[in-house]
Image: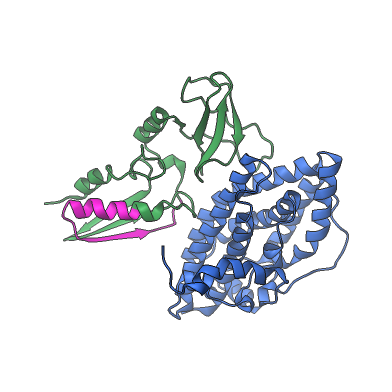
Amino acid sequence: MVTEQDIWHWLEDVNDPEVPVLSVVDLGVVRSVNLLDNEVEILITPTYSGCPAMQVIENGIRSKLAEKGLKNVTVTTVLSPAWTTDWLSEKGRKKLREYGIAPPENEVDKSALFADPVVVPCPICHSKNTRMVSQFGSTACKAHYQCNDCREPFDYFKCLK
Amino acid sequence: MNNSISTYTLRIADDSLILGHRVSEWCGHGPILEEDIALTNIALDLIGQATSLLEYAAATEGKGRTADDLAFLRYERDYTNVLLAEQPNGDFGQTIVRQWLFDTFRLFFYEALCYSKDPQLAAIAEKSLKETKYHFKHSSEWVIRLGDGTEESHQRAQAALDLLWRYAEELFFMNAVDHELIAQGIAVDLTTIKPLWLERIQHVAKEATLKLPETNWVMKGGREGQHSEYLGYLLAEMQYMQRTYPGMEW
């Protein structure tokens, strides 16, 4: 007998295609799992409106559940409540750091122009002496930073609230 | 099926789609690598927002059309984006000034639309607002950097503002569709956000040592499908693949 908990557990093997160290559960993209008789409904939410990974994530969820023998699977995209980096799990933050991406820090109000960018510790050498190169990075969810001590450039998974 | 909601949603969608396409033209041509990436990220957010909006416009229209049909298979006169969105990129300064006028509008617009009684519009607004805050910060800071920068950058930013200011008023266009939906608590009464927009624009312009043009000359028509000469060329490029290979998928 399959339970919702089993499904959550299986979804931990479905990774984000752009940040493959994170599962869709770590990322907070899976919002709910509803099991009714033999039918499963999964609600997912995009990190950013234009996130090109959503289709791949949906396919990944379908094939993982098909592999486990679940056939009647609906994956529905919901926009509200809007995704926030607060939904990144603790495990997810740890995995990001180990992978070389700095996890989101609590940021100041974005309406303040030219405010000092948030201090993001370098995921390689842990120095806090880093600088923001660009608010926009390799994907919609990341900003580009560089460490002033070890000189290593790194991605910062930017705060979205 | 509510056609006023569809018409209203389509306007917001077209602004995002057309401006998103314009900004995407910078891909590979940005003045520096970081800006190339920033502009393409902003374009991606806009196209993403357009996707959600077009899906909803298609659903509420009730004619069996899809978001792709609306994006790629309409004629020029059927697009209801503001003229500002379709104006050419020009130099980097012109792109930034266009984006700043638009982002500042979108910031207040989405903030208000979050309270719409239409749950889907409110959800799209809530999602898009978070992205728009980043865009607003980016374009405002660049306007200040360019305006209060070198003699050359100041002159170019001022020239862009002189050129584009006449298109700003159309952002606040309203007609019977808006009034009907405002009465139902669905649409945003744009007269309430105009003073907020102007105050913020004046504040940044002052920091940027830029002068807002003193003119009442207004260019509009986009909301009613009457476009500048630039939209046709944009559509020719954007629609090329679907027109040449109808129904093509990848």
Q: Which residue corresponds to the image point at 46% horizontal and 26% vertical from the top-left?
A: A123
Q: Is residue A71 magenta?
A: yes
Whether residue A33 appears in this view of the structure is no
| Along the line of sight, the residue nearer the viewer: A156 or B128 | A156
Residue B226 in the image: above or below residue A115: below
Colour chosen for chain A:
green
First to last magenta residue range:
A58-82
Which x, y percent locates residue A30? Answer: 34, 49
Side of A9 where B223 appears, left or right: right
Verify whether residue B127 appears in magenta: no
Q: Image point 58% across, 63% down: which residue?
A: B17
**Total labels drawn:** 0
Given the current orientation, which residue lies at the most extreme front position? B244
Residue B246 horizontal side relative to residue B228, left or right: left
Q: Please tell me whether residue B14 is drawn above or below residue A155 in the rendered image.
A: below
Q: Residue B250 sits in which quadrant?
A: bottom left
* Colouring convention used in this rendered image of the protein: by chain
Q: Is residue B161 above or below residue B143?
A: below
Residue B216 x/y as whole percent: 85, 66
Q: Is residue B99 left or right of residue A155?
A: right
Residue at position x 64%, y 59% in the image = B22
* Chain letter for the part of the structure drawn in blue: B
Nearer to us in this view, B54 or B125: B54
- Residue B221 appears anywhere in the view: yes
In x, y percent, where is residue B26? Answer: 64, 52
Q: Please tell me which residue is depicted at 72% across the width and 67% down the height of the picture.
A: B170
Q: Is residue A147 above or below residue B132?
A: above
Residue B14: % across, % down: 59, 67
Q: Nearer the viewer, residue A44 or A123?
A: A123
